[in-house]
Every structure is written in C-alpha cells, then in structure tokens.
Image (cartoon, coloured by chain):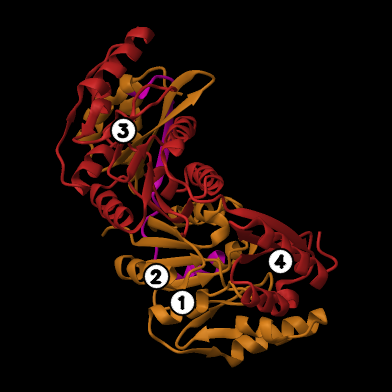
Chain colours: A orange, B red
Amino acid sequence: MPNPTAAMLVIGDEILSGRTRDANMHYLAGELTKHGIRLAEVRVVSDDAEAIVGAVQALSASHDTVFTSGGIGPTHDDITAEAIADAFAVPISIRDDARAILQAHYDRQGSELNEARLRMARIPDGASLIENPVSAAPGFTLHNVHVMAGVPTVFQTMVASILPTLTGGAPLLSQTLRIPRGEGDIAGPLGDLAAAHPEVEIGSYPYLKDGVYGANIVVRSTNGAAVDAVIGKLVALFPEAQ
Amino acid sequence: MPNPTAAMLVIGDEILSGRTRDANMHYLAGELTKHGIRLAEVRVVSDDAEAIVGAVQALSASHDTVFTSGGIGPTHDDITAEAIADAFAVPISIRDDARAILQAHYDRQGSELNEARLRMARIPDGASLIENPVSAAPGFTLHNVHVMAGVPTVFQTMVASILPTLTGGAPLLSQTLRIPRGEGDIAGPLGDLAAAHPEVEIGSYPYLKDGVYGANIVVRSTNGAAVDAVIGKLVALFPEAQ
C-alpha cells in the first residue's frame, strides 16, 4: 500500500513579502518523513480569505491530511479559523471548552480575557481542539485539516501532539552519497541505475562549493535492503563517492 | 493601478522530504517586494510531471508572472523543461543556441558535452533563454513563466537578469514597530487603526522570546507618507513600542 500523503498550507503575508523566512515547512517535512507520511505539496498564500478557502478545499480533496500554519491569533489579520469554516461550509462561534482554556490561562497570568483574545476561542462546528501547552490558544482539526499556529515553538508542539494520532506508512529510509563530480558526468550511469531499480527513488541534488561541482545522490525506499543494494552499486560505479 | 502579482513554483522532492531547506523562496520574495511586484502565492511540488504541469497551468493563468526553481539539470529526475512544454502544449527539442552555449562552456572546461549534458539544451518551442553566468546551462522564459535552476547561486543570478525586464509597480514601502506586549493586549486598538486606514496594510507578527510575548507590527503601502502617518499613530497608542 502506498504511504499516505499530506499537504501543507502556510498562511502569511510576512513569508510572501520576504520579511520572515518560513521555518515550519522544513520542520513538518522532516517529521512527516520520519512518520512514514509523504509530504506531497506545500502552498503559501497571503492573509486573504478567498485564497485560504480555495487552497484548503483543493488540498483537502487531493491529500489524506492537510496541515495549516498561521493566522489563528487575536489580531484583525488572523482570519484562518473563519476561512476554514467557510471552506467546509460550517458555522463558527465561540466554544465553551476553548473559552475555558483561555480563561484559565489568562487568570493564571493575571491578564484579562478581552474581546480580542476571545476571538481565539472561535472554533468551527464539529472541530476537535489541538492542545497548545505553550500559549494556551488551541488549534483545531476539522475533517482532515489540522489548523495550527504559525509561531514555530507553538507549531512544533502542535505537530507533536497530532502525529501520534495519524496512521503513518512504513518510514521512508534514505542514504546519501556525495559524489564530487558534475551531474553531467554521472547522469548517464545514474539514469540507467534508476531505470533498473524502480523499487527505490534516486534523487540527484547538485551543489557548487568552492568552485567545485558535485552532487548528493539520495536513495530512498521503505525497503532498507533495497537502499543498501543500490548504494552498493553506486559506490562501485563511482569509487570517489563519499 | 494595483501592483502586478507573481507566483513561484518550487520543484523538488528534497524540499518536501525535509532533506533540504529551501532558500530560493525567501530570496525571490525579498527581490520582488523591492521591485514592486507582489508575490501572491508559492507552491512546492515533487519531481512529478503531472504535479508540475497542473501547478504551472494554474499559476500561469492566475498571476502576471510565474517563477519556477529546480529540475533543469542533466539527471533522470530533472523533468521540468518537458513538463513546462506539456503545460503549454508546445514541442520541445534540443535548440542550437542552447547547445552552442553548453558546447563553449564544456570546451573551456575540457569536459565532454555528453548525452546527459545535452538534455540541458532541450528548450520548449517559442521560449527565450535566460543566461546562466555561473554554470552555463540556461533557464528559459515561455509565455509568463520563467524557468530557473534550483541551485541558489544560479537561481539568484537568473532572477537578477529577469527582474529588470519586468514591469514592476511602485515599490512597497514598509516600517516595523516592535511592541513588547502580547497580541491580545494590542489587538483591539490595532484592529480599529487598520479599519480606519485601508490605504495601508497592517500586519501583526507575534513572537515569544525569553518567555516574553510581543508582536512586530508591519505597516506597508506604496505611499510612504501614509506609512509614516500610521506609524506615528501606533507610537502614540503604544508608547513602549521600539
């Protein structure tokens, strides 16, 4: 059975304007790979309701699981929860369990649960909450979409709480060989090897370092013995591999 | 007139598997913003022909300009050029001008222009070449899609050669204020200010540092005086802003 696929939707003008460099995509990609789930697509859209709704509908329909990051805070530009509710045509309102979590958190802090903060208790009907041990305001899961905060520390704890609930496939195993030769030198034999071994994926990732061309060759499969065998053939073909 | 919009398509399994952290998106976002072009959407897809074709067609239809990165090298997993040709239903073949560029480059290096390297001269009909002063193999522009290498040094020189050919809008100006208070404390007045000033975009980007919550408030507009005025009001509202 093929491994389940996931997609990610990053929501935020700050990424698209170049102000902030996204960190969540790289984190999620690594965690999903370890868990045997293939991240098949990522989209980044701005804080725009129509863009979010369209992307959520498309990704939710074409992948087993969708993860979103960003746009669930208390400010005027946080519109993700409303957009997710729109995407699935369900109502959204302040929910008692989410309000209680926020009330307890701000009571402990000695802060007021004001109108702005209360927006973070707005949860689409039918969603389940995702715990946020860092700053209390919960994420939520609606259908196959997990809606999480954009702040990396919070995003990461939310991912950690969701992953064990998902059915992963066999972990994708990989080995890398670094070959200090230009891709053009190795592409012929590499392509033949790839064609002869459809049971593994062979990726070639060129680099240019200190004026020297080379390529990292990554061999991936859920079958560790198959990876070992192809790596052995690569070393025989390219004895200079590291 | 609204600023032109752009989209980016990042092609590469290595990003989606978490092996490599993408650097090109952040670079392009910053360059486009300086040039007055709004990066409206980014998609990351794997080295899969169907995924690339679908994304190129969707992004090309909905944005003024599309930039792609990755998948134009000589190895078996480099399928971007074919996919772009498919996306626009045009033939693709080895082109004399691209072959001449490669021949001259490998002659200088004392390397052979072998069959694998010759794949990098495959250019869709009707495309114009994008110069690659780093490693010779050209990118190309077909319709409104600019197809570039994934290696960051090459990607960046290609962006530098394309940007002056594009019609940018007025540069988007921005100023940032750092407010060392939780977003929930400032969201009310901030929302009122945003509603009163539709001529600027006001974004709030929360952070959590050394246990202290705060937010970076970014005010953006093509009108510098409007940005100044709103920043002045923010400082009056939040005297602790930095």
Give me the chain letter of mark 3. Answer: A
**Badge 2 element:** helix
- In the rendered image, residues at marks 1 and 4 fall on the same chain: no
Residue indicated by mark 1: A83
Q: How many residues crowd around disc 4 within 10 Å: few (fewer than 14), some, or many (20 or more)?
A: many
Quadrant for residue A154, please give it.
Answer: bottom right
- The Cα–Cα distance between marks 3 and 2, rounded to whole angstroms, is 39 Å
**Residue A176 in sight from this viewpoint:** yes
* Between marks 3 and 2 in the image, the one whose residue lies nearer the viewer: 2
* Between marks 4 and 2 in the image, the one whose residue lies nearer the viewer: 4
Residue visible at 34% across and 48% down in the picture:
B46
Q: Nearer the viewer, residue A198 or B173?
A: B173
Q: Nearer the viewer, residue A200 or B95?
A: B95
Q: Position of residue B234 (x, y in %)?
A: 76, 68
Residue indicated by mark 3: A230
- The Cα–Cα distance between marks 4 and 2, rounded to whole angstroms, is 33 Å
